Amino acid sequence: MVNNKYLFFGGSYSNFHAIQRLKETADELGIPAKNIFHTGDVVGYCAFPEETVRFVRDWGIQVIAGNVEIQLANGENDCGCNFDEGSRCADFSTLWYPYAQTQLSEDSISWMRSLPLYLSFELNNKRWSVIHGGIKNISEFIFASSPWEQKEQIFKELGADVVIAGHCGLPFFQKENDKIWINPGVIGMPANDGTSRVWYGIYDASEESFEIKSLNYRSDQARKQMYEKQLPPEYADTLITGIWDNCEILPDKETAVQGTPLEEKKFML
């Protein structure tokens, strides 16, 4: 029997516990690896960069480069998020990013160099594109509150009807003028909603629906490993509290709902 479901997610962020649980979920749903898309930033804040890369590669899913992969592949000395100098995010990145560099094998770095910047495909008479941040700027943060004109330009550049995006860390679904922008969320860190849950999306091609789903996993163990590896404790605690250490990257609208639990939602395309 053909499985008409597709799974989308971003930001595994070296969170080995979360990606293991996500694969278990995909297997339970019978979703094949070829129908699973990762929007980049395989590596990030958590304790297992090399293990996470190996797991993703062995899984055989479709992956695009995030800004972290590009920076690591190029041997750069920061994560490429363009945080303001002296900000808490910038200061934390001086801890987790060098740790990731020391843990990754040359084989994993070579794999990162091979990753595409985006993927496009036809599905149910729509052109879908999977991107990380923006097109001209891979580190561009695009939120639900970001102007639709900003998203509309990317639709035009890609010739896309549906864009699946990553990077901003918060799940949302928007539809306007028959164009659909979806961020399925990330699985490496909570969505600043006061819960330890992480997020991904399922598209059911048979009924043309998209569901934004939450995932529970052993966040306590992921936190413990971050402490043991002497990674930023503020990020480690976020795995449990579900509250980001700061809202430096967030627009006012997203900042205002910090700590408000998100709900799983289903949308018709």
Image: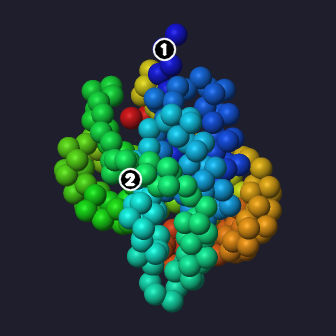
Query: How is colour applied across the structure in the image?
Result: rainbow
Q: Quadrant of the C terminus?
A: top left
In the image, what residue type sits under mark 1?
Val
Residue 69 drawn above or below residue 214:
below
Residue hosting label 2: 113
- Residue farthest toward the front in the current orientation of the protein: 106
Q: Residue at x 61, y 49 (%)?
A: 52
- Counting labels gives 2
Residue hosting label 1: 2
Q: Secondary structure at mark 2?
A: helix
Residue 123 drawn above or below residue 172:
above
Percent coordinates x, y for residue 223 in the rendering:
76, 62
Q: Secondary structure at mark 1?
A: loop
Nearer to me, 120 or 106: 106
Q: Residue at x 46, y 29 (%)?
A: 34
Question: Circle 1: is it few (<14), some (14-19), or many (20+) Cα within 10 Å?
Answer: few
In the image, what residue type sits under mark 2?
Arg
* The quadrant where residue 247 appears: bottom right
Circles 2 and 1 in contact, beta carbons < 8 Å: no
Q: Residue at x 51, y 45 (%)?
A: 9
Q: Residue at x 66, y 56 (%)?
A: 48
Percent coordinates x, y for residue 156 in the rendering:
19, 50
Q: Is residue 196 visible?
A: yes
